[in-house]
Image: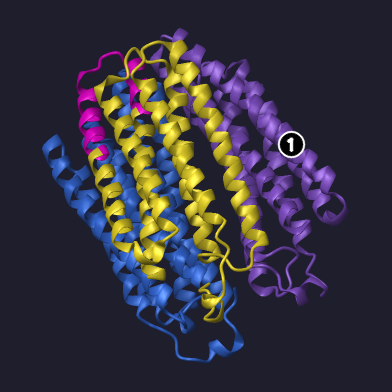
Chain colours: A blue, B yellow, C purple
């Protein structure tokens, strides 16, 4: 549903922007903890990090609900309702995937998370930081198209890099790992890390569609 | 899209409520069969239960389509269209996940489904019964907020319990099971059971958002 | 949101139809390559096919974005906006799943993809061809209900066949395969192939709901 011509000139509710920033901040905090966690080597450390990440994930969940609640009470929204929905759920997804990655590390407790695992975690952290920058720019949307598009491209490039790391690693893993149980653990962890970068890129796609629509 | 002021006072189509109840009833029947199935120990029994659950899942699918069809012909709906969509698909998802859990038991045919597997099935049954009660209350929505919110909390608590059962069990499984093929079977079955409780909690989230929006 | 009475008699934008056809065409091309790929036996061949399929998947992605972009600029659409959204994303999903299947074959590099794997790939090809025919009929929607419904039934039947092939094969695999790593590879590949036929059937469900709504 396009905003009507009239409503384009009426004052719009701006309280959504700090909420988007907060959601992005949650994913960045969770991503930083995930990267720290993958530098650790013991089950106890992994469990402790998972608990902290899970806490953040719940706060993110609550904030996403608050946004939807706010949306139902607000008449003039800065973007169309379904766009606020998409942005909210795409931001929330990133934190969900980070949580799910940390959970897998904690409950599978692999012998090692591998350098490629740490590389993916570092790419996830970069992507979450990009998303924070994007949410900072979003409030001044009107004259920040170029900056926002650059961030979307960055998210796309990060996802491509993550894809390459993942594919190369899994290919090797299935050739070289002879311990099937370790292989299953690592495959599941790496898969979730890779899906996290997909989720981050998806935020970029939503932002890009906002630019196209409202530019 | 919020219902317009005018339409808030016009008579609304009520035929959706029995359809929601019916969808919930399908998930409860499927959940009861799943719990029975996990008390069995032979492939033949598992296959027979899977067939019965699959039948129910197809009826649920048909009913969900009927609701969407009804929606397209109805002018004054009891909730906004996208809310009816969300509720319908969240209810349908529960039965889908139960079906998918039963399918995994039938086609993987593990040596044992474990006490934790049976515990998850029993939590799924509890959750499906909660959902039935919620759909009973929904028709008198206006003065049943408290009861509905209590049920949402119950669904949330069940999901938390299921999460703990799942995480503890998988952690042990990956430590103790040395037969990799059995490990893969059990992990996949347990994962789907756990996702079923997520799907049930999701219905609770949709109901909670209805309360917030229309209260 | 139903199209208003007025808009039902106004000329509608028709440029969406060639775009739907193009999306369907992408899935058919990718499906043909996937079937060829599964007739191969070496890693190098699988990698080469995966690269070609990935290229198509990206073109599909771009086209899906173009449709959403077009949608945001178009006032009188041939179907309601959310229906164009659903159709676009369901068509895009098919190509995504084909890509993901090809990726699994390339990175897991199993000893053999099995006759059942080739059977699923052939069913996927049939389904993608059905979808192309459906998109051809869609433009003359008004007097092609019968033909469209027949195609939907065909997609449903293909999915059922694929389900049977998948279930029977996995059941046998878990009984007979003693090499756990090969088992994991094959299970993951077969699962993705089966989900691809689900995605194709989902297009049929979207088309069926269009018929019900606009008939």
Task: Using the image, determine if residue C97 lies above or below residue A137.
Answer: above
Q: State the SS at label 1.
A: helix
* Quadrant that contains the C terminus of chain A: bottom right
Report the residue at 80% width, 53% height from top.
C138
Q: Relative to the observer, which residue lies in front, A52 or B109?
A: B109
Q: Residue furthest right?
A: C143
Chain designation of label 1:
C
Any part of residue A215 in sight: no
Residue A4, percent from left and from top: 60, 84
Q: Relative to the observer, which residue lies in front, A54 or C142?
A: C142
Relative to residue B91, is residue B180 drawn left or right?
left
Residue C84, percent from left and from top: 67, 60
Q: Which residue is mark 1?
A: C153
* Structural crowding at the residue carrying mark 1, measured as other residues with C-alpha within 10 Å and reported as few (<14), some (14–19) or many (≥20): some
* Residue segment shown in magenta: B162-189
Task: Using the image, determine if residue B55 lies above or below residue B92.
Answer: above
Residue C208, percent from left and from top: 71, 47
Any part of residue A140 in sight: yes
Relative to residue B32, is residue C102 drawn left or right?
right
* Quadrant that contains the N terminus of chain A: bottom right
Q: Residue furthest left?
A: A44
Magenta segment main secondary structure: helix
Relative to residue B132, is residue C151 drawn left or right?
right
Relative to residue C58, is residue B215 drawn left or right?
left
Residue A40, percent from left and from top: 16, 41
Q: Quadrant of residue B130?
A: top left
Task: Using the image, determine if residue B43 lies above or below residue B11.
Answer: above
């Amino acid at each position: 549903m396009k905003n009507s011509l009239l409503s384009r000139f009426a004052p719009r509710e701006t309280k959504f922007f700090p909420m988007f920033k907060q959601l992005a901040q949650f994913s960045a905090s969770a991503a930083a903890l995930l990267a720290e966690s993958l530098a650790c080597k013991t089950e106890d450390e992994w469990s402790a990090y998972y608990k902290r990440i899970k806490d953040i994930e719940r706060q993110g969940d609550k904030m996403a609900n608050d946004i939807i609640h706010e949306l139902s009470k607000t008449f003039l929204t800065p973007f169309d309702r379904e766009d606020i929905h998409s942005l909210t759920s795409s931001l929330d997804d990133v934190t969900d995937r980070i949580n799910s990655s940390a959970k897998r590390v904690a409950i599978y407790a692999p012998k090692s998370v591998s350098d490629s695992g740490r590389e993916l975690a570092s790419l996830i952290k970069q992507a979450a930081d990009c998303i924070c920058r994007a949410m900072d720019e979003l409030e001044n949307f009107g004259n920040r198209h170029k900056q926002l598009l650059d961030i979307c491209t960055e998210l796309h490039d990060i996802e491509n890099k993550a894809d390459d790391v993942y594919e190369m690693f899994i290919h090797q893993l299935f050739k070289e790992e002879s311990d099937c149980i370790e292989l299953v653990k690592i495959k599941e962890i790496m898969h979730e890390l890779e899906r996290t970068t997909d989720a981050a890129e998806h935020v970029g796609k939503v932002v890009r569609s906002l630019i196209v629509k409202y530019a």
